[in-house]
Amino acid sequence: MTHAALNTRFAQRFQLTTPIALAPMALATGGALAAACASAGALGLVGGGYGDLAWTHREYTLAADLLKNDATGQARLGCGFITWKLDENVEALDWVLTQKPRAIMLSFGDPRPYAARIAEAGAQLICQVQRMDQVPLALDAGASVIVAQGGEAGGHGANALEGRSTFTLVPELADYLATHSPNTLLLAAGGIGDGRGLAAALMLGADGVLVGSRLWATQESLAAAGAKTQATQTNGDGTARSMVFDILRRKNWPAPYDFRAIRNTLHRQLESDIAALQTHPESARADYDAGVKAGDFSRAHATVGEAVGLIADVPNAGVLIERITEQANSLLSVR
C-alpha cells in the first residue's frame, strides 16, 4: 500500500508503493539488488553501466528469474546505461529492450540517438542531468523522467567547476519543468540516504528520488564486503570527487565528469598532482591493482557519495526501503 503522502506522480506512473528508484550503479547494482528493490515497491534498475553484454545479460536475467512469480515486481524492472559508452557499442541496450523493461535510464551523454528504439520497445526513458543546460537535450529525447543529480552523489557526476548541488538544482529544475514540460517527472539524486532526504526532495518539488550510495550498502549489492564495511566507518567528510580512480582504473571519461569515492590512503597520496598521475600512472596503477586483488580498501576504491555519513549498517534492501519510506511518511504526515 502506498502512503498518501508518498503517492506521487512517479509512484503512480510506475505503479510503485514508494517514490524511490534504485540507481543503476555499474558493477554494483546487479540482478539481486534490482529484484529486491522492485519487490519492495521501488523501481529496480539493473546497472548496465559500460554496456558489457555478458554482464548485463546475466544480471538482468537473474532479476527477471527472481521476480518470475511476482508480476507486479516484474513491471518495476528496468536498466541503466552510460550514454557515451553506448556510442561505442549499443548491443547491451538492444538486448535489454527485447526483455520489455519498464524503463531505461541514460546518463552522461546525448540520449537522443537512442530515444526512438527505447520508445518503440515500450520502455519509459529516464535521463539524468547535472546542469540546467543539459535539460533541453533530455526533453528533446522525450524523457518521461529527468533525474537531477547533485555533486554530492557517489560515483560519476559533474566536476566541481560544472556541477550543482542537489538542494539548489532540484527546485530550479522543478520550476522549469512546471512551465516548459509539466508532464515530465523529476527525481532528485545525490546525498539522499534516508527518509529525511526523500521527504526533503518531495518538498523541493521532486516526484521521487534516485538512491545510489545507501542501497549500495545492502546485502544484495555486488559491492565488495570490505568496501561496505569501510563505508560504515566513514563520515560525510571522507569522500572526494576527482579523476584519481578513473586514471587508476583506466577509465577514459570525457569532461566534465569525474568520480566520487572514499578518500582513502592511496587517493590522498595522489590527489595533489593529477597531471603527474596522468603522465606516469604505472606505479600507482600497480599499487591500486594489488589493493583490489587483496581487498585492501586503503588502496582499492569504495564508490559512495556524501551520504556515506548516513550508512551505519548493511541491511537487506527491502528492509532499507521500508525504513526510508516509513521515515519519510512520518515526516510528511505531520500536521
Image (spheres, helix red, strand yellow):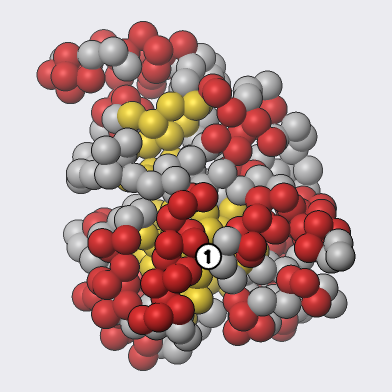
Which quadrant holds residue 38?
bottom right
Q: Label 1: how many residues lie within 10 Å, few (<14), some (14-19) or many (20+)? A: many
Q: Amino acid at mark 1?
A: Leu
In-front residue for pair 160/66: 160
Q: Quadrant of the N terminus?
A: bottom right
In-front residue for pair 202/33: 202
Asked whether residue 104 is in view, the answer is no
Query: Image check: 234 left or right of 267?
Result: right
Rendered position, 154 above or below 262: below
Residue 259 coordinates in the image, percent (x, y) = 37, 36
Residue behind mark 1? 187
Q: Quadrant of the C terminus?
A: bottom right
Residue 292 coordinates in the image, percent (x, y) = 46, 23
Query: Image check: 235 left or right of 137?
Result: right
Which quadrant holds residue 66?
bottom right
- Asked which secondary structure carries label 1, the reply is strand
Residue 153 coordinates in the image, percent (x, y) = 48, 43
Query: Image check: 87 left or right of 148?
Result: left
Determine the residue located farthest toward the left in the rendered image: 279
The number of numbered badges drawn on the structure is: 1
Which residue corresponds to the image point at 48% horizontal and 17% vertical from the top-left? Answer: 264
Query: Image check: 46 left or right of 134?
Result: right
Rendered position, 95 above or below 324: below
Determine the residue located farthest toward the front in the rendered image: 335
Which residue corresponds to the image point at 36% horizontal and 60% vertical from the top-left? Answer: 129
Which residue corresponds to the image point at 68% horizontal and 21% vertical from the top-left? Answer: 233
Residue 306 coordinates in the image, percent (x, y) = 55, 35
Asked whether residue 233 is in view, the answer is yes
